[in-house]
Structure formats: C-alpha cells, structure tokens
Amino acid sequence: MINLLFSEANFDAKWAYPSVCSYMKKDSRVLVIPVLSGDEWSEDEREWEYHYRKGSRHYEKIMAPFRNYQIHDSQVTWFCPHRETHDGAVMKIRNADIIYLCGNHPDAMMKMVSDLD
C-alpha cells in the first residue's frame, strides 16, 4: 500500500500531476471520507447530503482532481457516518484502491473511526 498525504485538494495541479499520476489510475475505485470544514461532523444525514450531494460545492471541489486523473464519479463511493454500519464501512474500505480523507479536523476523523467499533 502507498500512502499519499495532501493538505489540499489540488493534487492535480501542474506541480503534483507528474508525481501523483502513477498512483491515480483511471480504473481506481475511490472511497471519500469527508468531514465538514467546521469542528464537527454534519449533525444528521440531511445536513451531510446538503454538503456532499452531487453538484454541491463540496462535492465538486472533492471530485475535480479525481476527474482530472480520468477517475469517473461512478468509481467514487462516499462515506456517510449517519447511515454507515461497521460492516459497511469495512467493506467500502476493502473495496477501495484509494481512500481520500478530507477535512481539517483530525480529531473528528478519529472519533468517527472509533465510533464504528
């Protein structure tokens, strides 16, 4: 397994593309695990859908770099903590070639992971 750490969703920029393109294959399956830009997860499934539905600002910003690597929306699975079970999360992780953790609150991410136990 290869781990890539990006601080922003600009890993398709000119400076990054030559180094990253060998890892972003057009047939890759991606799992996106987003955290809202605030201090907490979205409070409920409705709010999560508002922020991460197809066409929303967050969705488009997250998807843009993957599209530039020829990874289609249909190859991307999203993690919603309000409807995910432990077994479902494990299955999504196992089926993914790329796991994209995005957000600016690592403590919230770790809490989400521990809540799945």
Image: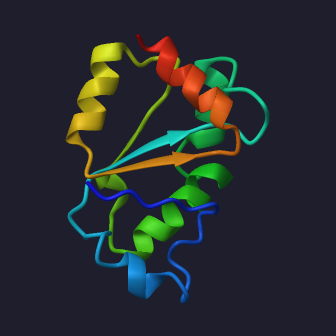
- Residue 62: image quadrant is bottom right
Q: Is residue 43 above or below residue 91?
A: above
Q: Is residue 15 above or below residue 91?
A: below
Q: Please give left or right for residue 84 compared with residue 109 in the image.
A: left
Residue at image point 42% right, 69% down:
67
Residue at image point 30% right, 70% down:
23
Q: Is residue 12 above or below residue 7?
A: below
The answer to whether any part of residue 66 appears in the image is yes
The answer to whether any part of residue 56 appears in the image is no
Image coordinates of residue 95 in percent, x first then y, are 21, 40
Q: Please give left or right for residue 66 compared with residue 81 in the image.
A: left
Q: Is residue 47 above or below residue 101?
A: above
Identify the coloring. rainbow
Image coordinates of residue 60 in percent, x first then y, are 57, 59
Image coordinates of residue 112 in percent, x first then y, are 54, 22
Residue at image point 69% right, 18% down:
43
Q: Please give left or right for residue 99 compared with residue 42 in the image.
A: left
Residue at image point 67% right, 26% down:
41
Nearer-the-camera pick, 85 or 99: 99
